[in-house]
Amino acid sequence: TPLPLAFAILHTDARVDLFLDQRKLTSAVILHLGQRVRIFPREAFASALATLGRQGARVYLDMAAIPMAVVDRLSGAHVISGPNPCALFQACKNAVELDGMRAAHRRDGVALVRFLGWLERTMTDGRHVTEIEAADRLEAFRREGTHFRGLSFATISAAGPNGAIVHYRATPATDCSLQAGSLYLVDSGAQYLDGTTDVTRTIAIGPPAAEPQRRFTQVLKGHIALAMAVFPVGTTGSQLDVLARQALWVDGVDYDHGTSHGVGCYLNVHEGPQRIASSGNAIEITPGMVVSDEPGYYKAGAYGIRIESLLAVRPVVPSPAGAERPLLDFEVLTLAPIDRVLIETVLLSPPERAWVDAYHAWVRDTLTPLLEPDDTAWLARATAPLT
């Protein structure tokens, strides 16, 4: 996250008391905040809460998200519980933010294609590549992009059985080489001044075995089902979650994490209040929200598979003839090829095959003008129509 660790108390007269390490504030930021925002050291937050408690103040808290330490220090206050009133406004991006997210994903797509092309060429030359080396190379490509400000989270660079560890992080003690006949899962993202990215691709290192190929294709079917979803206004994430799992359920397998989380615009890469998961969530999926689409499958001790792209929620315009309620669908933001080697095409329906080919054509047409010849040639092969 690009945010400094801070706390704030918003008063009913619109004054704000902001508590943070003041070394993180520039004079320009202080000027921008204005006189209605008072700056205090972060350490003063606890005493400010205690004062509110002693005064018996009415304090509105989101009890589902607030640290218990805050509640404890408000002893004596009249606490009113409810959802964070800022979260939904933050989650629904405006037109400028959405344009920024699109631009950030184009630059991120360039870095991803350069990385994937480099990885294939390096492995084809017979040189060993380790998890940490791959993560470092991907970060280096991203750092060359305009407006890059850092990674949005520590890259999950997971070879073979490490891919089955959902939140794996390579260390010198666990770092291993990408081996022929295995899968490589890379989950990564970046913070740009105009947007935040989060993308996962699973890559076959050499020809894949039959089972991983089948599981990958089932995960892809779920990914496509969510990306293609059309749904009425008022739909919640828990109502959409089954779309991403149904192809895996046919074989009696599943994944034990949510299908989707919200994503901020140069803010937190995990952002609420929306999410798509089997657990209950009463938040409606609303135009302007950006969510991930990331079904997966994990076989302990063997391999992991996840395909993740970011989606922006938008109204369906025009509405279908005869529609009796307004509809929403998704715009795909992420530009990164899906490994065609891992797709068992006979498992895809004609609409699913058409979706893959259309997605790859969009990736190719968008990124080709931004790439050097070697990467352009690789992208043309990687996004060729399915056979």
Image: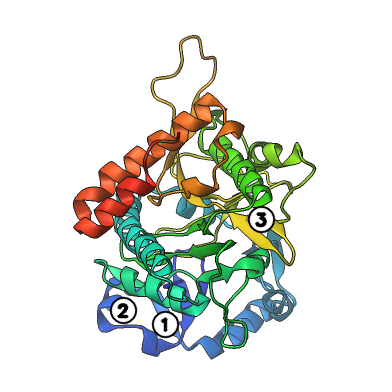
Label 1 – label 2 distance at C-alpha: 9 Å
Q: Secondary structure at mark 2?
A: helix
**Residue at far front of view:** 126
Specify the amino acid type for callout 1: Ile
Label 3 – label 1 distance at C-alpha: 26 Å
Among numbered discs 2 and 3, the one appearing first in the sequence: 2
Question: In this picture, is 63 found above or below 260?
Answer: below
Label 2 – label 3 distance at C-alpha: 30 Å
Specify the amino acid type for callout 3: Gly
Quadrant occupied by the C terminus: top left
Residue in the picture at 34% in, 60% down: 108
Q: Which residue is mark 3?
A: 82
Residue 180 visible in the shown view = yes
Among numbered discs 3 and 1, the one appearing first in the sequence: 1
Give the number of the disc on residue 30. Answer: 2
Give percent across and percent down for residue 229: 54, 32
In depth, the one of 32 and 141 nearer the eye is 141
Residue 290 visible in the shown view = no
In depth, the one of 104 and 367 nearer the eye is 367
Describe residue 53's horizontal placement relative to residue 34 as left or right: right
Q: Secondary structure at mark 3?
A: loop
> Dividing the picture into quarters, in which one does residue 365 lie?
top left
Give percent across and percent down for residue 35: 33, 75
Describe residue 259's horizontal placement relative to residue 362 as left or right: right
Among numbered discs 1 and 2, the one appearing first in the sequence: 2
Specify the amino acid type for callout 2: Ile
Give the number of the disc on residue 39. Answer: 1
Query: Marks 1 and 2: CB-CB under 8 Å?
Result: yes
